Every structure is written in C-alpha cells, then in structure tokens.
Image: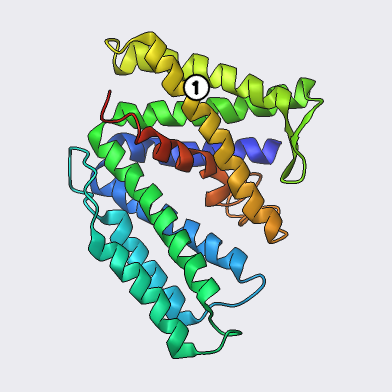
Amino acid sequence: MKQRVISGAVALALFVPILLYGGWVFEIAVLLLAIQGLREFIHIKETRKKMPDFVKVMSFLLLAIMVLSKSGMKEFNFLVDFRLISALFLAYLIPVVMYHKREVYSVNDAFYLISGLFFIGTAFNLLILIRNTSLLYIVYLFIITIMTDTYAYFIGSLIGRHKLLEVISPKKTWEGSIGGTLFGVLIGATFFHVVVNPTIPIYFVTLMTLFLSIIAQFSDLVFSSIKRYYGKKDFSNIMPGHGGILDRLDSIIFVMLGFMFFITII
C-alpha cells in the first residue's frame, strides 16, 4: 500500500504540471504514454507468441501518426481520416501473405494489432484533442475516474462482501462498485456544475456523470479480462504498486470514448 501511494504521488507530481501547461509538452508526454501502452499491449501478446520485429516497428510509427493526428486543432471535431484506417489494414494484413507462416504471423495476429492500435491510438489522440478543447473537461473526466476507482477500492475493502465478477477481477465487489459510483457521481457532477458549466441542467450533468462512472468500471473490467486471458496480473511493472500504463489509465480510456456522446451537447 505504501509503495502504491508513493508511486501514485510521483506520477501525479509529474503529470499534473504537464497537463496544466498543455501544448507540445503535453502532446509529447501523451505520445510517450501511448508508446508504453502499446508496448504493454504487444508484450502481453508475446507471452504466448513473439511478433515479428518489422511489424512492431511499424506499429509504433503508425501509433505516433494516430496520436498526433489533428493535435494542433483548438476546436473538437469528428472528422475521420480514412487514410489512417486504410493504412492500418494494409500495414497489418499484407505481412500475413509476406510471412505466409501461421506460427510467425497470422491473420489473428493482424486483427489483434489492428484493433489494439486503433483503440490505443484513438484513446490517446482524444486525450490531446479534449485537452486542447478545454482543460476543465479533462480535469472533470479524471475526477470521475479517480474518485470512482478510489472509493470503490476503499469501500470494497471495508464492507465488500459480494463479488462483482470474480472470474475477471477477484477483489472487486458490488458494494465497492456502488460506493465508487455514488462518490464518483457526487464529486464529478458537483465539479462540473460549479466549475465547468453551471448553465447545464444539474439532472443532465448527473446522468452524464453516472454514465461515465459506470463506463469507467466497465473499462477496468475489460482490461482485467485481457490480463486474465493471458494469465497476467499487470500489463507491466513500470509503476510499482499500480502496474503499467494500461493498468493505471484503463478507466480513463473508456470514459473519454463515452464522453464523445456528450461533448457536442455541452
């Protein structure tokens, strides 16, 4: 527990000033986080089968393009660059024929990497785009995820009795999940209503925050299911007590994706 608190405090001390500063410094920091996240995603796959070096190098190049795509824009938009999507499919499916050996590189490997790169690249690109749109939006989303996760952990530890999904995450309980949602919504909705935009009806803010808090917990479970499938406790040990980048940022990834349903309304 002490190690977890210390590494968490160090991470916050590094990330918060960069988040507040924004600009190219924030974009480079996000790119580095995304690279580590993709590295963890590939590494967990390689516990069963090593990926060709050429495919891995190509993955990181494509990731950099995806994460920094439209990064200079100050207003959010939903334009999709189909060149990037086309590049993903071509870059990963053509090598299936080039290697022509299932034990080296197969179509299953290709679609694993396509989905992973698209997922991670989109999520970290959104982190930059939302930050460029409004610092307060990003703070609001992090408040939801941090408060939901923190209170779910402590309430679950104190009074948790009924397992949520033991096969995926043995320590999570219904009591912790409900408690995390209640406090995540209370603190998150209050912050949004008082600081971000007081003109939005409180009932709408509450429902939006409730949706995002629940989505945050689903995100945690999805990433936990990936780890369980590969028989791993954490994606990596880069953050002692927390695991890897995907272990620490798993909840915010789904929350940002879910926030896309609301960003044009608020």
Question: At 69% from the left edge and 36% from the top edge, which residue is drawn?
Answer: 2
Q: Secondary structure at mark 1?
A: helix
Crowding near the residue tagged with mark 1, few <14, some 14–19, many ≥20 C-alpha atoms within 10 Å:
many
Nearer to the camera, 53 or 90: 90
Q: Quadrant of residue 174?
A: top right
Whether residue 105 sits left or right of residue 20 in the image: it is right
Q: Amino acid at mark 1?
A: Leu
* Number of numbered discs visible in the structure rendering: 1
Tell me the quarter of the image containing the N terminus.
Answer: top right
Nearer to the camera, 113 or 152: 113
Nearer to the camera, 150 or 86: 86
Question: At 47% from the left edge and 60% from the top edge, which residue is drawn?
Answer: 116
Tell me the quarter of the image containing the C terminus.
Answer: top left
Q: Is residue 247 above or below residue 251?
A: below
Q: Is residue 37 above or below residue 158?
A: below
| Residue 191 visible within the image | no
| Residue 87 visible within the image | yes
Q: Tell me residue 176's x, y (percent).
A: 69, 25
Disc 1 target residue: 210
Q: Tell me residue 24's x, y (percent).
A: 24, 49
Q: Quadrant of residue 59?
A: bottom left
Q: Tell me residue 123's x, y (percent).
A: 40, 48
Question: At 33% from the left edge and 10% from the top edge, which residue is drawn?
Answer: 201
Q: Residue furthest right?
A: 161
Whether residue 245 sits left or right of residue 25 in the image: it is right
Q: Tell me residue 61's x, y (percent).
A: 34, 69
Whether residue 262 sits left or right of residue 249 in the image: it is left
Question: At 61% from the left edge and 64% from the top edge, which residue is drawn?
Answer: 44
